[in-house]
Amino acid sequence: MNFQVTVLKILVSYPDGFAVMADLKRDMAILATSGRDWSDRTKRLAARVSELDIFSHGLVERLNGGWRITEKGRAVLELMEAKPAEMRTESVAPAVEPPASDPAASPPLAARRSGRSQRLQRRRAARERAPAKAC
């Protein structure tokens, strides 16, 4: 489980994004014991933003015995949760239309790329966008 992503997800679920430490600890314990799905999900989200540090990047602020997510924190969380199609920029559009062919003749591009290659491309794209959104 990625601690920092979990903190962001917990805080965004509270009114005004603020939770006292006792509530944070309780929610964290529930999620930590909820199974592998949560752990896998937070790892995937964390992989989209390199070197995530919720305090030094100003995503979460400490105050009055608790923590609050900032607007910047909400924006970074939205970036992490964006579907790959939403994360693409318009400049990525191909310059030339691919020739029309029988779809059964060749597998789609996504099926031809290895899973590792796709992950690396997503990470690279997230790193390029993260400073613009997180700063």
Image (cartoon, helix red, strand yellow):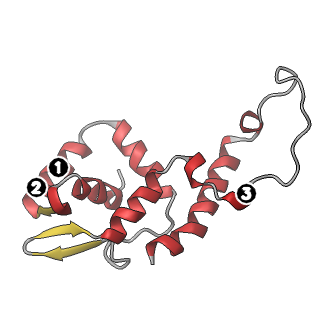
Q: Are marks 3 and 2 in contact (CB under 8 Å)?
A: no
Q: Residue at x 83, y 20 (%)?
A: 104
* Up/down of 67 relative to 25, above or below: below
Secondary structure of the residue carrying tag 2 is: helix
* Up/down of 113 relative to 108, above or below: below
Secondary structure of the residue carrying tag 1 is: helix
Say which amino acid is labelled 2: Asp
In the rendering, at what x and y percent does residue 19 appear? 13, 61
Say which amino acid is labelled 1: Asp
In the rendering, at what x and y percent does residue 24 appear? 15, 57
Query: Between marks 3 and 1, how big is the CA–CA gap?
Result: 40 Å
Q: Are marks 2 and 1 in contact (CB under 8 Å)?
A: yes
Q: Residue at x 22, y 51 (%)?
A: 13
Q: Nearer the viewer, residue 34 or 71?
A: 71
Q: Residue at x 72, y 41 (%)?
A: 114
* Up/down of 37 relative to 86, above or below: above
- Residue that carries the numbered disc 2 in the rendered image: 23
- Residue that carries the numbered disc 1 in the rendered image: 27
Give the number of the disc on residue 7: none
Q: Residue at x 50, y 56 (%)?
A: 47
Disc 1: CA contacts within 10 A as few (<14), some (14-19) or many (>=20): some
